[in-house]
């Protein structure tokens, strides 16, 4: 039975390297044989656990195979092999009793990544095309309002000359002579436990079970070819920097009739010199005169939708925020818009005319 090194050190399986090291030092200090009340056997177990979990490579193997991984034949039972650990790794239970040893190819494929029969069967059918990731830089105003953009990128597309089957139109399509149409061939894999016979994808027909008298001259028999694609991307109003738009079926072409992958476009928004974004609100700054702040009035203000007259309440203080309701950013997947928030700074004049000074003196006496 595999030893539980995590329990021995008293840490979780998600413990960091630093947490494992700290736990080892604490326990080693507690159980060191030279200390009063020390325990040599316990200290040995703690050291053994740390030697494995403290090493990233050994820990990875331990997590996959258990504590017998580094012994000749992996240690354990059944002639030096710990079947319980391997059965658990393969998802086939915790006991070797009643196991059909004719399925060793599938067992080792699951436990060690050799690719057993089940996995190879799946790979001979239609395969979905790969996804494509791209990035698009837009202006602040475009992100707020939304727009349609035509983007161009490289991808593989189904060959129109052969309709994706890889054969020159009119030529014969025969059964593959290597695999007799099964799409698989038998190979022998050498392992630490002996030679294992496995079924793998046919190297001649790549799993199709067919051979072509004449490969397609346009795609060289691949069924797909590189192309420069152009599509119209709908950028929704309110999209933010770093968000991604998914275009279903616009990725790489599939194989053997499989569907195309998806296109993921990450949006990057250039900062605006005039506006800032705060959630779905737009933020800008304005400087107003002392009389306007004291008496109130209107201030011509630029918004994302054009200029408006901003109402400045009488007695506005420097640092106040004046809001324009509904003049912000459209809410994605929701209703309504945010607000436009104007951060106001009251300007104190540095130079005053004689008349202005006189008026200020009179005003000071009134306040």
Image: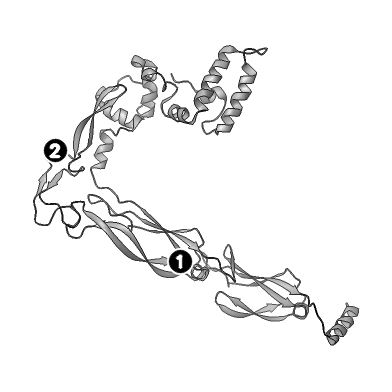
Write down the residue under mark 2.
178
Residue 292, quarter of the rendered image: bottom right
The residue sitting at 29% across, 50% down in the picture is 128
Q: CA distance from mark 1 to mark 2?
A: 53 Å
Dot 2 falls on a residue whose secondary structure is loop
Task: Name the image quarter holding the C terminus.
Answer: bottom right
Q: From the top left corner, tell me how far across and down residue 306 is, in percent.
A: 56, 79
Write down the residue under mark 1.
236
In the image, is 94 to the left or to the right of 347?
left
In the image, is 348 to the left or to the right of 189?
right
Residue 100 visible to an observer of this rendering: no
For disc 2, the neighbor class at 10 Å (few under 14, some 14 to 19, many from 20) is some
Towards the viewer: 33 or 97: 33
Among numbered discs 1 and 2, the one appearing first in the sequence: 2
Residue 360 visible to an observer of this rendering: yes
Q: Is residue 271 above or below residue 76?
A: below
The residue sitting at 66% across, 13% down in the picture is 35
The residue sitting at 77% across, 80% down in the picture is 291
Task: Name the image quarter holding the N terminus.
Answer: top left
In the image, is 38 to the left or to the right of 137?
right
Residue 151, quarter of the rendered image: bottom left
Which residue is most to the right?
A: 365
In the image, is 362 to the left or to the right of 183?
right
Towards the viewer: 318 or 91: 318
Q: From the top left corner, tell me how far across and down residue 254 is, in percent.
A: 27, 52
Dot 1 falls on a residue whose secondary structure is loop
């Amino acid at each position: 039975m595999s030893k539980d090194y995590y329990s021995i050190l008293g840490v979780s399986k998600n413990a960091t390297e630093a947490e494992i090291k700290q736990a080892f030092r604490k326990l080693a200090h507690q159980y060191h044989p030279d200390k009063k009340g020390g325990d040599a056997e316990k200290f040995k177990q703690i050291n053994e656990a740390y030697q494995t979990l403290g090493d990233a490579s050994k820990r990875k193997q331990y997590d996959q195979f258990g504590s017998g991984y580094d012994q000749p034949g992996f240690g354990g039972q059944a002639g030096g092999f710990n079947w319980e650990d391997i059965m658990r790794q393969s998802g086939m239970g915790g006991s070797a009793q009643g196991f059909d040893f004719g399925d060793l190819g599938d067992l080792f494929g699951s436990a060690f990544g050799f690719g057993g029969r089940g996995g190879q069967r799946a790979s001979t059918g239609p395969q979905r095309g790969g996804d494509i990731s791209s990035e698009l830089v837009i202006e602040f105003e475009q992100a707020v309002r939304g727009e349609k953009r035509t983007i161009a990128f490289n991808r593989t597309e189904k060959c129109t000359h052969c309709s994706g089957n890889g054969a020159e139109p009119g030529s014969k399509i025969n059964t593959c002579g290597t695999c007799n149409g099964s799409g698989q061939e038998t190979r022998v894999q050498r392992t630490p436990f002996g030679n294992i016979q496995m079924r793998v994808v046919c190297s001649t027909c790549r799993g199709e079970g067919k051979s072509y008298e004449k490969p397609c001259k346009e795609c060289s028999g691949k069924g797909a070819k590189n192309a420069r694609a152009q599509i119209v991307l709908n950028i929704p109003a309110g999209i933010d920097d770093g968000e991604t738009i998914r275009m279903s079926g616009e990725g790489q072409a599939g194989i053997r009739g499989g569907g195309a992958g998806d296109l993921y476009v990450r949006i990057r928004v250039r900062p605006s010199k005039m506006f800032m974004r705060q959630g779905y609100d737009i933020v800008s700054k304005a400087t107003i005169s002392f009389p306007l702040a004291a008496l109130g009035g209107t201030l011509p203000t630029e918004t994302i939708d054009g200029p408006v007259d901003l109402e400045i309440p009488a007695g506005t203080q420097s640092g106040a925020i004046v809001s324009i309701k509904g003049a912000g950013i459209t809410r994605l997947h929701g209703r309504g818009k945010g607000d436009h928030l104007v951060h106001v700074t009251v300007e104190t004049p540095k130079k005053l005319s004689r008349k202005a000074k006189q008026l200020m003196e009179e005003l000071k006496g009134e306040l």
